Amino acid sequence: MTKAQWSPALKRYQARFWPTMIVYALVLWGAIHLLQTGHPAGLTKYALAVAPAVPTLAVIAILGRYLVEETDEFRRMLTVQSMLWGLAFILAVTTVWGFLEGMADAPHIPMFYVFPAFCAGMGLSQPFLAWRYR
Amino acid sequence: MNNRLKVLRAERSWSQADLAQRLDVSRQSVNAIETGKYDPSLPLAFRIARLFEMPIEAIFQDEP
């Protein structure tokens, strides 16, 4: 799909998503910097640690907003299908890795990788869905 | 579900993009419906029927 073929809802999604990702990068960098240099404690430490999660939660809301605003039902169905592929992907990976961690001493993977992995699963499904509905 | 969308569109010399514009959907939607890979919702089926001024069952058939 070319940029000219984007629906108004998809344009709004893109206009919301990319600035939020920039905010995420800045907040993540700032939080790491302050935690390493300021050595905060107590509530400040918790607030700094959770700060990068806020833009991530916003991206989840932006994705949901796109589903609500997309008036083209076929495109909405494609997005829902890619979300289901992403969900299946992350459920499979975390289940397998959980057993590997628990029983085979595989290295621990932090939970904040779950959402990017979900997005990766969504992305990986795109060529398959494009082929299926070509 | 089978449909006569491609024939009806061809009778009017409309491209998929023309029909998509008239229905306010993407060209991919029209293609997916025409090829039987996607069955439209009832509201979209009614919009298609109104556009071609035909009853829904004259465009969509649930039997081969």
Image (spheres, coloured by chain):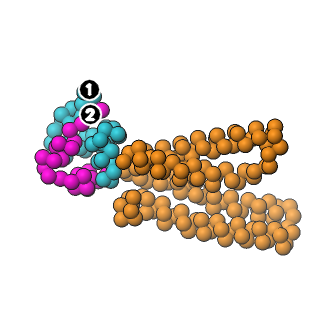
Chain colours: A orange, B cyan
Classify residue A29 by image quadrant: bottom right
Disc 1 element: loop
Residue A68: percent from the left, percent from the top?
A: 46, 50
The amino acid marked with disc number 2 is Asn
Residue B36: percent from the left, percent from the top?
A: 31, 38
* Range shown magenta: B1-25
Please tell me whether residue A96 belongs to the stretch shown in magenta.
Answer: no
Q: Residue at x 79, y 45 (%)?
A: A106
Of the two numbered discs 2 and 1 on the same chain, state the one appearing first in sequence.
2
Q: Residue at x 58, y 65 (%)?
A: A20
Residue B1: percent from the left, percent from the top?
A: 30, 32
Relative vertical location of residue A101 with respect to residue A52 in this rendering, above or below: above
Query: Left or right: A120 with respect to A81?
Result: right
Disc 2 element: strand
Q: Residue at x 58, y 53 (%)?
A: A119
Mark 2 touching mark 1, by CB under 8 A? yes
Query: Left or right: A84 with respect to A9?
Result: right
Residue position marked by numbered label 1 in the rendering: B63
Q: Is residue A116 visible?
A: yes
Callout 2 and callout 1 share a chain: yes
Q: Nearer the viewer, residue B5 or A24?
A: B5
Please tell me whether residue B20 belongs to the stretch shown in magenta.
Answer: yes
Query: Left or right: A113 with respect to A15?
Result: right
The amino acid marked with disc number 1 is Glu
Classify residue A77 by image quadrant: top left
